[in-house]
Image (cartoon, helix red, strand yellow):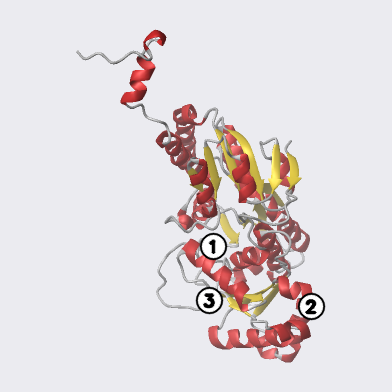
Amino acid sequence: MAQIVTSTKSCTVNPLRMSQPLGAALALMGLRNCMPLLHGSQGCTSFGLVLFVRHFREQIPLQTTAMSEVATVLGGFENVEQAIVNIVGRTKPDVIGICTTGVTEIKGDDLDGYIRDVRKKHPELAHVALVPVSTPDFKGAFEDGFAATVTRIVEYLVEAPAEGATPDAGKINVLAGSHLTPGDIDELRDIIEAFGLTPTFLPDISGSLDGHVPDDFTPTTHGGVSVADVAAMGGAGHTLALGEQMRKAAVALEAKAGVPFTLLARVTGLVAADELMATLARISGRPVPQKYRRQRSQLVDAMLDGHFYFGGKNVAIGAEPDMLLNIGGWLADMGCTVSAAVTTTTSPVLARVPADEVLIGDLEDLECRAEDCDLLVTHSHGRQAAERLGVPLFRMGLPMFDRLGAAHQVAVGYRGTRDLIFAIGNLFIANIKEPDVNSWRSASARPDQTDAPATAH
């Protein structure tokens, strides 16, 4: 069991952590025809907008209540009201998610009360769903904001089934954690549908941030799960929660609609993929399709091919808790030692990370602990540390702004794990020091001839 330690530095030197409002905004982008609204200053929203645009390389719908110094002191009701009215008038969304920021949380704005007052003053907005979320950016991290938002969506939008209604055993809810990419969700959808099940993903960023070109411009999200589909999640036969961060949302869904859930902490690795397949086989009552039996065989072969390069390697990982467990656990399965593990926030899964110690800190902490490592795994802000250490960097997580295809990275199931073995294994191979003329000569020389001059033949 890993020991959890919190950094006691006076300041963050090289940030690993991202704030709760950004996680909340990403979750809201998985709803169709949605407009995320950050209740705070314009700078808070601008920063998040730039970060998401650089990572996904897509248009990002994100609005702000544009709090000024005076509005912050006196209270932000008028800003929230005006922002909602303007957004509805100009963009015609189905749902608006309103997320607090540090400045409005410090002031103590009652966002839930503001929404109730807006409803009373503007009955014409009754057709628009409003979901308020408390996401202070002075505590917690990206994963916390994402999880809190999914829970609030469940509480506000899911409808309890009618009394005596029979759940639809062919439908399954999938609560997808923030560590999953649009590519991961697409892969999981294919797997679930192969068992004859109809999945509803919440949130579903595979439809809104997967890099497709829409037929028409829309100022809101142009994909994702609809409000109607979210409302119908209470009639599903089962819920699959992916990542510990989704536990609260799964519990809220079970309490509201009586839908039982299964939580899978990991979806990367042979054992984790086996558990996913066994769970789906149990829920659907069908055997694992032959397609995935073959993919499992390919993964086992890839593990045999790659273990020569993974075995004995020291790896340093900086990531959100669920991703840290998912990737760290898989690397340990491959024979690596997770000698440095740094994360952003507390979570029950941290004790399960295969490392002696997990530090809640920043990238400077990770760099200090990674001096003797063979690989660094974190997002793009770790590139300077990897260069200074002279070790390869495998980019995972958000943001990833100096490489293409971040949204399509797949690391789940048999196929995703197999491709991950190839990607990281090739990094290890590329970092092997090839012998040159001088190293051949020194390696072949006898001890008593080390300093002898070379003889020409």
Quadrant of the rendering where the C terminus is positioned: top left
Q: Quadrant of residue 217?
A: bottom left
Mark 1 is on which residue type?
A: Ile
Residue 157 vertical placement versus 14 (above, below): below
Q: Marks 3 and 2: which is nearer the front? A: 2
Residue for point 55% across, 57% down: 398
Q: Nearer the viewer, residue 32 or 353?
A: 353
Q: Residues within 10 Å of mark 2 (few under 14, many from 20)?
A: some
Q: Residue furthest top?
A: 448
The label on residue 110 is 2
Q: Nearer the viewer, residue 176 or 77?
A: 77
Which residue has dot 3 on it?
220
Residue 423 vertical placement versus 70 (above, below): above
Quadrant of the rendering where the N terminus is positioned: top right
Query: In this rendering, does residue 283 appear at all?
Result: no
Which residue has dot 1 on it?
205
Query: In this rendering, does residue 447 appear at all?
Result: yes
Q: Position of residue 142 (x, y in %)?
A: 65, 59
Q: Nearer the viewer, residue 166 or 244?
A: 244
Disc 3 or 2, which lies upstream in sequence?
A: 2
Between marks 1 and 3, how big is the CA–CA gap? 13 Å
Between marks 1 and 2, how big is the CA–CA gap? 29 Å
Residue for point 56% across, 42% down: 268
Q: Residues within 10 Å of mark 3 (few under 14, many from 20)?
A: many
Disc 1 or 2, which lies upstream in sequence?
A: 2
Q: Quadrant of residue 255?
A: bottom right
